[in-house]
Amino acid sequence: MTLFEIIILAIIQGVTEFLPISSSGHLLLPAELFGWVSQGLAFDVAVHVGSLLAVMIYFRQEIAQMTVAWVKQGFSKQQSTDSKLAWYVIVATIPAVIIGFLMKGWIEENARTALVIAGTTIICGLLLWYADATAKREQELEGLTLKQAIYIGLAQVLALIPGTSRSGITMTAGLMLGLKREACARFSFLLSIPVILGAGLLATLDLLNANEAVDWYALLYGAAFSFVSAYLCIYLFLSWISRIGMLPFVIYRLALGVILLWFVFA
C-alpha cells in the first residue's frame, strides 16, 4: 500500500467505527472506485489498536470509575451507578461475542457482499431515522436499566451483518428505549471497547497463524491516523449530536446505499 492509501483507509476506519454510517460500506468504496486491494491482517490489527486507544483515552475517567466501582461493589448488594454501568457493558457485550463466535465463518462467506452492505446501509439508516424522529429521548445514561442494556446488546448482534453499523444499531436501540441522544452515543462508545478489543485480538491471532509479512511503517501510520481520526470523531460527535440529531447521518447512509447499489447493478 502507498502512504496515501494507508492514510485514507486508517481515517475511514477511525471515523466510521464510531459514526452511525457503516464502516463496511466505506471500506468497500476504495476497492470499487480505485481498485485498492485488501489492506491485510497486520494493517487491520493496527487500525483497531488506534481506534481502541482513542476511545479508551477519551473515556479514561469513566473507565477508571467503572473499574474501581465494579471491583469494590460489583459483587455486593449495594451497587453504585458506575458498578451497574460496568455490569451493563459486560452483559450487553455477551450476545455479540457468542453469536459472532458461532457465525463468523458463515457471515464472512455469505453476507460480505456489496448487495448485502447496500441493503443494510439503507434499511438501518431508515430505522435510525424512525427511532430519532419518534423517540421520547428523556432518559440519561445514569438511569439505564439491565433490561435496556440487554436489548441494546441484542441489537448489537445485528451489527455482525456487514453494512449495519455497530454504533448505528446500538444508538437506534437506545433511542427506541427512550434514552437521550448523547446517552445513546456514550453507551454505544463504551460498548465499542470490548468489541474492538475482541476484533483486534482475533485479527492478531489470524495474523500469527498466517505468517504474513509485516510492513511496520504501514502499521505505525495506520495506528496513528486511526487514533487521531477516531478521537476527533468521538469528541465532535458527542459535542454536536444533541443539536444536529441523526438526520444528517440518515441522509448520508441513504446516499451511500444508493451509490453501492449503483455499483452492484451498473
Image (cartoon, rainbow, N blue to C red):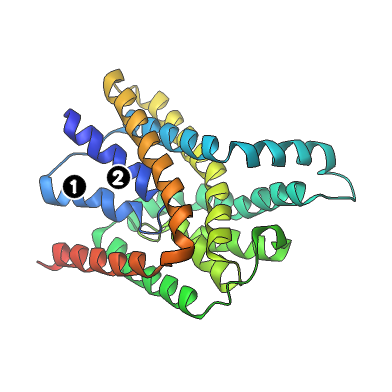
Using the image, determine if residue 156 lies above or below residue 135.
Answer: above
Callout 2: few (<14), some (14-19), or many (20+) C-alpha neighbours within 10 Å? many
Query: Between residues 60 and 122, which one lies in front from this camera angle?
Result: 60
- Dividing the picture into quadrants, the one containing residue 21 is bottom left
> Which residue: 36% across, 50% down?
16
Name the outermost residue toward the left.
Answer: 266
Query: Between residues 78 and 215, which one lies in front from this camera angle?
Result: 78
Q: Which element is circle 1 on?
A: helix
Using the image, determine if residue 203 lies above or below residue 34.
Answer: above
C-alpha gap between disc 2 and disc 1: 10 Å
The quarter in which the C terminus is drawn is bottom left
Amino acid on which disc 2 is placed = Ile
Q: Which element is circle 2 on?
A: helix
Amino acid on which disc 1 is placed = Pro
Is residue 120 among the parts visible in the rendering? no
Q: Earlier in the sequence, mark 2 or mark 1?
A: 2
Q: Nearer the viewer, mark 2 or mark 1?
A: 2
In the image, which disc is placed on residue 12?
2
- Dividing the picture into quadrants, the one containing residue 154 is bottom right
The residue beneath circle 1 is: 30
Looking at the image, residue 76 sits to the left or right of residue 213; the answer is right
Name the outermost residue toward the bottom.
Answer: 134
Looking at the image, residue 32 sits to the left or right of residue 225; the answer is left
Callout 1: few (<14), some (14-19), or many (20+) C-alpha neighbours within 10 Å? some
Looking at the image, residue 9 sits to the left or right of residue 124; the answer is left
Query: Between residues 211 and 163, which one lies in front from this camera angle?
Result: 163
Residues at marks 2 and 1 touching, judged by CB atoms closer than 8 Å: yes
